[in-house]
Amino acid sequence: MQEFFFVSPGDVSEHKLTVTGEEARHIARVLRHKKGDKLVFTDGTGVEYECFLAAVSDHAVTAQINARRRRSNEAIKRVTLAQAVPKGQRMDFVIEKGTELGLYGFIPLVTEHSVVRGAEERQAPPLPGFEDDPEGHKLERWKRIAVAAMKQSLRSWLPEIAPFTGFDDLMKRADDYDLVLMADEGERRNSLRQTVRSAKHEIRKVLCLVGPEGGFSDKERDLAREKKAQVVSLGPRRLRSESAGILLSALVLHELGEME
């Protein structure tokens, strides 16, 4: 079974790369790779490196680069999910599954109906390597999850995870996208398929908006429509926020021909 390994872009030179820390320990101690083994690394910027291991230890792995490839297994269309951050560890699920699907990036969204951090989240068990997971470490936690999902799904692009963003601030950047889609439980007429297929211009960059359990506020809906966002239905059944985010992302990628 093919495996991908992650190397920081700054640790790659013209002819070799070096991996340290947890990734090096995984290669050396867990998988027991040896000098001369052939492995594939990605730096998360769309580049893959076919390498032969030159030196292996628990602390550092050095590899000679044999060949380079660009953007293998990557979607051409860039779909970004702006997900209202759900309570507990549910955003972990969004980051993991969205990365596996092929999303370009994530925007942790703060809305009027967003739920404040509660006891369930404060007591969440940390990821390996984290003694605690306070507010300031959320983005680091999500990046670690995205790296693992990128490797598992054989992707070469590490999705960008933006800082926490307010809805009003996000809408100021709505013009950066060719299509903005807002999933809304109250919408029944406007289907996602019809919306994407009726677009009269080329779609290369899509922003998907998913609200919290309480939905978007009337003010947020009005602002989104002012910014030419298309409000779409995800079907007759009520979904949890994180389920809606993954479903919307998958349907958009499918309609854009990126799941074939």
Image: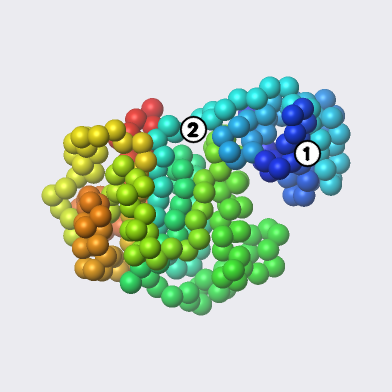
Residue drawn at x 25%, y 52% as measured from the top left: 229
**On residue 74, which mark appears?**
2
Quarter occupied by residue 259: top left
Q: Is residue 28 above or below residue 68?
A: below
Relative placement, left or right, of 146 versus 252 is right
The reply to whether the C-beta atoms of the residues labelled 1 and 2 are less than 8 Å apart is no
Mark 1 vs 2, N-terminal side: 1
Q: Quadrant of the N terminus?
A: top right
Q: Is residue 30 above or below residue 185?
A: above
Relative placement, left or right, of 89 versus 219 is right
Residue sitting at the far left: 189
Percent of width and height locating residue 5: 67, 38
Percent of width and height locating residue 88: 48, 67
Residue 125 seen anywhere in this rendered image of the structure = no
Is disc 1 placed on a helix, strand or loop? strand
Residue 115 seen anywhere in this rendered image of the structure = yes
Residue drawn at x 23%, y 44% as measured from the top left: 192
Percent of width and height locating residue 218: 21, 68
Is disc 2 placed on a helix, strand or loop? loop
Quarter occupied by residue 18: top right
Percent of width and height locating residue 51: 73, 27
Q: Is residue 67 above or below residue 239?
A: above
